[in-house]
Amino acid sequence: MEIKVLGPGCSNCNKLEKVVDEVTKELGITDPVQKVSDIKEMLSYGIMSTPALVINGKVKFSGRVPSKDEIKKYLQGESGASSCGCDSGCCQ
């Protein structure tokens, strides 16, 4: 599984990286969490705000720090929520 946290290093970016690390440990996921701070690479995902979470090449969240439960759902492949978390599908 490819897991990336996109962000320049702001406090929310660091917080997201920490929460994702905690969740992967809780779930027994051994794949490394990659921190991406290169602006060109971040822009290649089409995000407009950080932090963002990318799982297997798909942006799952952008512009906020999701809850541990939300992150778990995405890592387990169980969520049908939109990338903004509104569950209406408007953003996908």
Image (cartoon, rainbow, N blue to C red):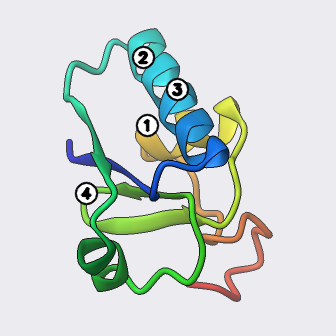
Q: Are marks 2 and 3 in contact (CB under 8 Å)?
A: no
Dot 4 or dot 3: first in sequence order is 3
Please identify the quarter of the rendering in which residue 37 is found: bottom left
Question: Where is mark 2, residue-wise?
Answer: 27
Mark 4 to mark 2 CA distance (whole Å): 17 Å
Residue under numbered circle 1: 76
Tell me the mark number nearer the camera, choosing from 3 and 1: 3
Q: Earlier in the sequence, mark 4 or mark 1?
A: 4
Amino acid type, residue under disc 3 in the picture = Lys
Q: Are marks 1 and 2 in contact (CB under 8 Å)?
A: yes
Q: Is residue 89 above or below residue 21?
A: below
Q: Earlier in the sequence, mark 4 or mark 2?
A: 2
Q: Measure the alpha-carbon separation of dots 3 and 1.
A: 18 Å
Crowding near the residue tagged with mark 2, few <14, some 14–19, many ≥20 C-alpha atoms within 10 Å: few
Q: Is residue 32 left or right of residue 66?
A: left
Judged by depth in the image, the label closer to the viewer, 2 or 3, is: 3
